[in-house]
Image (cartoon, rainbow, N blue to C red):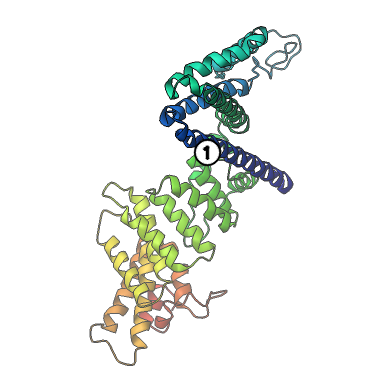
């Protein structure tokens, strides 16, 4: 959809909402004025509560008739996409029709509305000369319960005022709001223009807090197609999450944040979704405290039944994010969560959390080494050994982490981000160089 088409659709939506608000305000004003008039007539001796109840009854009856007159018609066809002169295989003259299945809209209410409106109009036209007499008889009937025959003219005014007002309110609200609501309910839910296999392919690739996951050409094509879809019409939470993942994959972190926020409003206990949201916030350069809070909220939702891969992803994201928060609280919390995870032998171990732990120990070593007064509770030699142990553990579990660890250790590593210096304090340590085969 082009930006012009999107703007036009948004303008139409706003205009429709404005029309509905104005109509609602007019109806409320109409009811308020009429109700005040009914109640203020108490001094004339009529029963105000009964009069008010009759007023509401007349308004409701008028609204019902207005609703019946305003119900839209639904046009339906059988197999509209099949040419009667063309077979299901596209060959002219073939009489074979491919069997189809579809759910059609129930139009019973529409048919009843059509019958009743014709009956009401027909009877009214036939009995037109008797309308004043019938109104007078109805007024006499209402007057008996609101104060007696002396209140006949008041009852007649009440009858006409609230019945006509109710009719207009019922008709306008049906046309301005219920017509659109019926249309949205009858149409299939908007969804991503993807096959189920494409959705499964995209769902298998979750964003990473470290680096962008490798995308195949097929995934790139899928995310580009999703880029043409607007977020607002999507109704399925699963589609919203896929949309946000695709936008993040395409580098549009701000749009991804919007999608994740919409999905989280529906499923706030989804741990994976909250991790995705935190990653999007980080890539959108949002404050670290907000990112940390989202991951801690996900951490609070862990249970013994939580999927192990999801748990590993959370601890990895949390310990990594904490490395970028203010020391000493940042590396202290990173070490706490990293050691907590490694203490459970049943957890999945791929070395990622060990890498984060090594970086946290490096930060801790640098922090306390630079203190003018040594902290008696911190032995730098112990912290150094913990960092080295974490490096060896990460390499043992997954040798591919060597490159990242070398980057963190070597100040002269090519194209290195200056902020990635957590292990540089050990750059001259032979044991670290040997562990990473740098010497």
Residue drawn at x 26%, y 83% as measured from the top left: 379
Q: Residue at x 34, y 53 (%)?
A: 311
Examine the image and state in which quarter residue 248 appears.
bottom right
Circle 1 SS class: helix
Image quadrant occupied by the N terminus: top right
Residue 310 image offset from top left, x and y in percent:
37, 51
- Closer-to-camera residue (341/123): 123
Q: Nearer the viewer, residue 291 or 210?
A: 291
Q: Dot 1 surroundings within 10 Å: few (below 14), some, or many (20 or more)?
A: few
User: Can residue 173 be seen here?
Assistant: yes
Q: Is residue 149 above or below residue 231?
A: above
Which x, y percent locates residue 231? 58, 45
Judging by the rendered image, the residue that carries numbered circle 1 is 32
Instruction: Say which quadrant the C terminus sits in.
Output: bottom left
Q: Position of residue 114 (x, y in %)?
A: 61, 14
* Residue 352 appears in the picture as rendered: no
Q: Nearer the viewer, residue 208 or 172?
A: 172
Q: Would you identify the image quadrant in which residue 188 lies?
A: top right
- On screen, 31 above or below 433? above
Horizontal side of 18 relative to 413 (left or right) equals right
**Residue shown at the point (23%, 83%) measured from the top left:** 377
Q: Is residue 241 left or right of residue 83?
A: left
Q: Give residue 32's position: percent from left, percent from top.
A: 52, 38
């Amino acid at each position: 959809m082009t930006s012009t088409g999107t703007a036009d659709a948004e303008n139409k939506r706003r205009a429709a909402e404005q029309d509905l608000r104005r109509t609602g305000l007019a109806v409320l004003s109409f009811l308020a004025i009429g109700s005040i008039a009914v109640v203020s007539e108490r001094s004339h001796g009529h029963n105000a509560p009964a009069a008010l109840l009759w007023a509401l009854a007349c308004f409701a009856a008028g609204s019902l008739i207005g609703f019946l007159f305003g119900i839209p018609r639904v046009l339906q066809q059988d197999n509209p996409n099949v040419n009667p002169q063309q077979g299901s295989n596209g060959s002219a003259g073939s009489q074979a029709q491919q069997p189809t299945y579809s759910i059609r809209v129930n139009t019973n209410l529409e048919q009843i509305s059509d019958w009743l409106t014709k009956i009401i109009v027909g009877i009214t036209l036939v009995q037109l000369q008797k309308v004043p007499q019938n109104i007078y008889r109805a007024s006499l009937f209402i007057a008996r319960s609101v104060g007696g025959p002396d209140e006949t003219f008041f009852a007649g005014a009440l009858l006409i005022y609230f019945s006509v007002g109710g009719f207009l309110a019922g008709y306008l609200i049906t046309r301005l709001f219920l017509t659109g609501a019926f249309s949205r309910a009858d149409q299939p839910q908007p969804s991503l223009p993807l096959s189920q296999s494409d959705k499964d392919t995209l769902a298998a690739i979750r964003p990473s807090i470290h680096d962008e996951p490798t995308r195949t050409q097929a995934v790139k094509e899928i995310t580009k197609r999703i880029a043409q879809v607007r977020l607002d019409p999507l109704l399925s939470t699963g589609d919203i999450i896929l949309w946000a993942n695709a936008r993040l994959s395409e580098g549009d972190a701000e749009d991804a944040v919007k999608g994740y926020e919409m999905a989280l409003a529906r499923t706030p206990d989804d741990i994976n979704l909250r991790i995705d949201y935190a990653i999007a916030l980080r890539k959108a350069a949002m404050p670290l405290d907000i990112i940390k809070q989202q991951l801690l909220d996900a951490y609070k939702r862990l249970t013994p039944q939580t999927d192990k891969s999801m748990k590993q992803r959370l601890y990895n994201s949390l310990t990594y994010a904490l490395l970028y928060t203010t020391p000493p609280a940042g590396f202290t919390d990173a070490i706490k969560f990293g050691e907590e995870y490694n203490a459970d032998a049943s957890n999945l171990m791929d070395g990622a959390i060990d890498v984060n732990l090594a970086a946290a120990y490096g930060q801790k070593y640098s922090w306390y080494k630079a203190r003018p007064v040594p902290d008696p509770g911190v032995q730098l030699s112990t912290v150094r050994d913990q960092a080295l142990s974490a490096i060896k553990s990460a390499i043992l579990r997954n040798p591919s982490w060597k490159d990242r660890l070398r980057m963190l250790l070597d100040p002269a590593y090519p194209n290195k981000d200056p902020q990635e210096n957590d292990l540089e304090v050990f750059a001259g340590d032979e044991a670290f160089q040997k562990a990473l085969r740098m010497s």
